[in-house]
């Protein structure tokens, strides 16, 4: 199944700015977050959005994607993920050039595979950071045979066909002359060794599955979709190669009161009609404490106030973002007759209840609808 265009996935144009890409990612990540969206395909959509953002948010990756699309120019000849597949091109190259072709030595040291672990943390843990231990399943060297794959007391034997090289040479006489074609040794499957008596624990693989405990430090200020790399904690390498890395993908639970946009925090506070009209001083909860906020007389609904430095610690730098408080004036309900009379009197004294004023408002609305 072909991948969708990354710009299409994020719903932005190809000329979108980094800020537009980031804003769209945050919106979609919240929409499809598996902790919020319980639809069957929500997690797949979340992964698709994350993959698109990882590419388009990186200047170099984005430039490569704009030029080549989903085809990886670095893997084009290998038929690997995202690359082009040339089928038997390697065999043809071997036939005419004696198996040179830059093919890897099957017995050369190889780096271990990377591992990925998804970690869900609380909203405030993402803000202030945390330290925790996680357990990951991974492949490790067998303790019984010390990674050899052979039964204790025995050793692997050098393959008698390839003499330990892991490759076989097939010589062909053609009209072009003598051609040497190299193939993976079928006798030892390219390992260069034969294990006669296999280890009973790992069954000759030299590796076993284990769960390893790893201590993780999550820095303050991480956000949804952040990726932490722990070097050397991936799968072990083979034949003396280095281990891979462990990548921890951060998922952040939604908060009942606060919302986050980058380094800023947003919240919504209700005001009574009296507080908005006469002004007041109220308490506002922040991430760490309660602070006083002065509400000026005549404050309108949907007005924003800024609490400087009460936001998220900057992940790479000094200081913090801000907290933005939106006030919403709550209309009173279930009024008794005395309260209604007082409001009618207030309206009369304010001159709000006039026929001409209402007529003027309706006329303006009518013109707006008609486009005049």
Image (cartoon, rainbow, N blue to C red):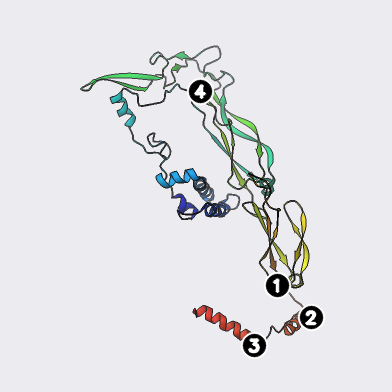
Q: Position of residue 131 (x, y in %)?
A: 69, 38
Local crowd at mark 2 within 10 Å, few (<14), some, or many (≥20)?
few
On the question of residue 1 being in view, the answer is no
Q: Using the image as rendered, state which of residue 260 and residue 344 is in the foreground.
A: 260
**Of label 2 and label 1, which has the lower sequence position?**
1
Q: Position of residue 181 (x, y in %)?
A: 31, 22
Tell me if 316 is positioned left or right of 113 in this view.
Answer: right
On the question of residue 98 being in view, the answer is yes
Q: Which mark is residue 35?
A: none
Q: Which residue is mark 3?
A: 355
Instruction: Say which of marks 2 and 1 sits in front.
Output: 1
**Secondary structure type for disc 3:** helix
Mark 3 to mark 2 CA distance (whole Å): 25 Å
Q: Position of residue 80 (x, y in %)?
A: 41, 36
| Quadrant of res 243 | top right
Tag 3 and tag 2, C-beta contact below 8 Å: no
Mark 2 to mark 4 CA distance (whole Å): 86 Å
Q: Which mark is residue 331?
A: 1
Instruction: Say which of marks 3 and 2 sits in front.
Output: 3
Q: How many numbered marks does the figure carry?
A: 4
Tag 2 and tag 1, C-beta contact below 8 Å: no
Q: Using the image as rendered, state which of residue 40 and residue 89 is in the foreground.
A: 89
| Quadrant of res 366 | bottom right
Q: Position of residue 198 (x, y in %)?
A: 51, 18
Q: Which residue is mark 4?
A: 205
Residue drawn at (54%, 24%) of the image = 207
């Amino acid at each position: 199944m072909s991948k969708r265009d990354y710009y299409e996935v994020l719903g932005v144009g190809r000329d979108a700015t980094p800020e537009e890409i980031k804003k769209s990612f945050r919106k979609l990540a919240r929409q499809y977050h598996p902790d919020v969206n319980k639809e069957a395909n929500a997690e797949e959509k979340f992964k698709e959005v994350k993959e698109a953002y990882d590419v388009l948010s990186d200047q170099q990756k984005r430039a490569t994607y704009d030029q080549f699309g989903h085809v990886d120019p670095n893997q084009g000849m290998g038929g690997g993920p995202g690359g082009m597949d040339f089928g038997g091109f390697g065999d043809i190259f071997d036939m005419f050039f004696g198996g040179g072709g830059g093919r890897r030595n099957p017995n050369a040291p190889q780096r271990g595979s990377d591992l990925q672990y998804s970690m869900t943390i609380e909203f405030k843990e993402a803000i202030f950071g945390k330290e925790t231990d996680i357990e990951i399943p991974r492949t490790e060297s067998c303790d019984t045979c010390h990674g050899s794959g052979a039964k204790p007391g025995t050793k692997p034997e050098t393959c008698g066909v390839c003499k330990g090289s892991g490759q076989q040479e097939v010589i062909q006489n053609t009209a072009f002359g003598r051609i040497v074609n190299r193939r993976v040794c079928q006798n030892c499957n390219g390992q260069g060794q034969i294990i006669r008596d296999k280890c009973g624990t790992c069954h000759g693989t030299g590796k076993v599955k284990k769960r390893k405990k790893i201590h993780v430090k999550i820095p303050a200020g991480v956000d949804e979709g952040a990726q932490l790399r722990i070097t050397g904690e991936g799968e072990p390498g083979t034949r003396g190669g280095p281990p891979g890395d462990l990548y921890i993908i951060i998922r952040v639970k939604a908060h009942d009161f606060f919302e986050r946009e980058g380094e800023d925090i947003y919240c919504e506070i209700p005001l009574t009609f009296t507080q908005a009209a006469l002004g007041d001083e109220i308490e506002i909860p922040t991430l760490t404490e309660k602070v006083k906020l002065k509400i000026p007389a005549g404050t309108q609904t949907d007005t924003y106030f800024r609490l400087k430095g009460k936001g998220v610690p900057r992940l790479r730098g000094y200081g913090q973002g801000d907290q933005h408080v939106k006030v919403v004036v709550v209309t009173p309900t279930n009024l008794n007759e005395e309260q209604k009379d007082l409001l009618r009197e207030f309206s009369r004294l304010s001159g709000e209840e006039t026929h001409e004023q209402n007529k003027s408002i309706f006329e303006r609305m009518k013109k707006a609808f008609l486009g005049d």
